[in-house]
Image: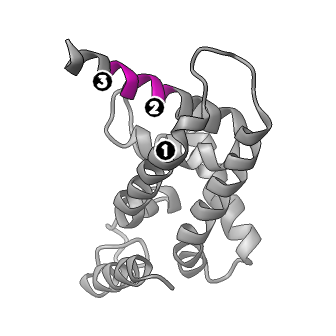
């Protein structure tokens, strides 16, 4: 387990000891979704991983062409693997009665449901600061979301660079 994973685990343990989680016996405590808890405990780490990934592989994406190259699929597989490795310990710990596969399905299902409007565990408005976390989660489940995330990040970076050169 990486040091970032162990620090996240210790943060979760502190929260559990404080009684500020959904496992509390107090019925007044809100029931948080797995997705919400993951954002709280892993959001910064996943954001850092995604930023590093974009910095390392963004040059592979051609923002002028609509053609999807084979390397994009390969990079999506690499992103999925990195994302799942970071998320695995958290999801398994939060869902002790589910298999690893069932826990991941639950997590990704919540992410998709939050976007389709079935429930809003993280945000109620399009501009909410938590939206990037959900987009990163969906990029790990759907190639099109990954492609759009990579491409829009590169376009945004290119726009910033063009703005600073003026």
Marks 1/2: CA distance? 8 Å
Given this view, does label 3 or label 1 mark the residue nearer the observer?
3
Q: Residues within 10 Å of mark 1 (few under 14, many from 20)?
A: some
Residue 121 position within the rendered picture, expressed as x and y whole percent measured from the top left: 45, 47
Mark 2 highlights which residue? 153
Write down the quadrant of residue 60 in the picture: top right
Mark 1 highlights which residue? 54
Residue 100 position within the rendered picture, expressed as x and y whole percent measured from the top left: 71, 75
Tell me the residue at 66%/63% (across/down). 81
Relative to 13, is 148 above or below? above
Q: Closest to the observer: 46 or 156?
A: 156
Write down the quadrant of residue 138 in the picture: top right
Relative to 68, is 102 above or below? below
Per the rendered image, the range of residues in magenta is 152-159
Tell me the residue at 31%/79% (across/down). 11
Residue 40 lies in magenta, yes or no?
Answer: no
Residue 154 lies in magenta, yes or no?
Answer: yes
Given this view, does label 3 or label 2 mark the residue nearer the observer?
3
Mark 3 highlights which residue? 161
User: Dot 2 lies on which element?
Assistant: helix
Quick check: marks 1 and 2 in contact, CB under 8 Å?
yes
Q: Closest to the observer: 132 or 56?
A: 56
Give the left or right position of residue 73, taking residue 151 as reference: right
Which of the two discs, 3 and 2, labels the residue nearer the N terminus?
2
Which residue is outermost to the front? Answer: 165
């Amino acid at each position: 387990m990486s040091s970032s994973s162990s620090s996240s685990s210790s943060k979760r343990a502190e929260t559990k000891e404080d009684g500020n989680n959904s496992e509390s016996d107090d019925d007044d405590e809100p029931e948080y979704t797995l997705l919400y808890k993951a954002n709280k405990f892993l959001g910064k780490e996943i954001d850092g991983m995604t930023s590093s990934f974009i910095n390392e592989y963004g040059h592979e994406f051609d923002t002028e062409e609509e053609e999807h190259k084979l390397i994009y699929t390969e990079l999506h597989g690499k992103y999925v693997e990195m994302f799942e490795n970071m998320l695995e310990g958290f999801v398994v710990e939060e869902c002790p009665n589910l298999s690893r596969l069932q826990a991941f399905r639950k997590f990704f299902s919540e992410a998709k449901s939050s976007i389709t409007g079935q429930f809003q565990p993280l945000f109620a408005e399009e501009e909410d600061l938590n939206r990037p976390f959900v987009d990163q989660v969906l990029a790990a489940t759907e190639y099109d979301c990954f492609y759009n995330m990579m491409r829009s990040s590169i376009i945004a970076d290119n726009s910033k660079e063009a703005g600073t050169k003026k």
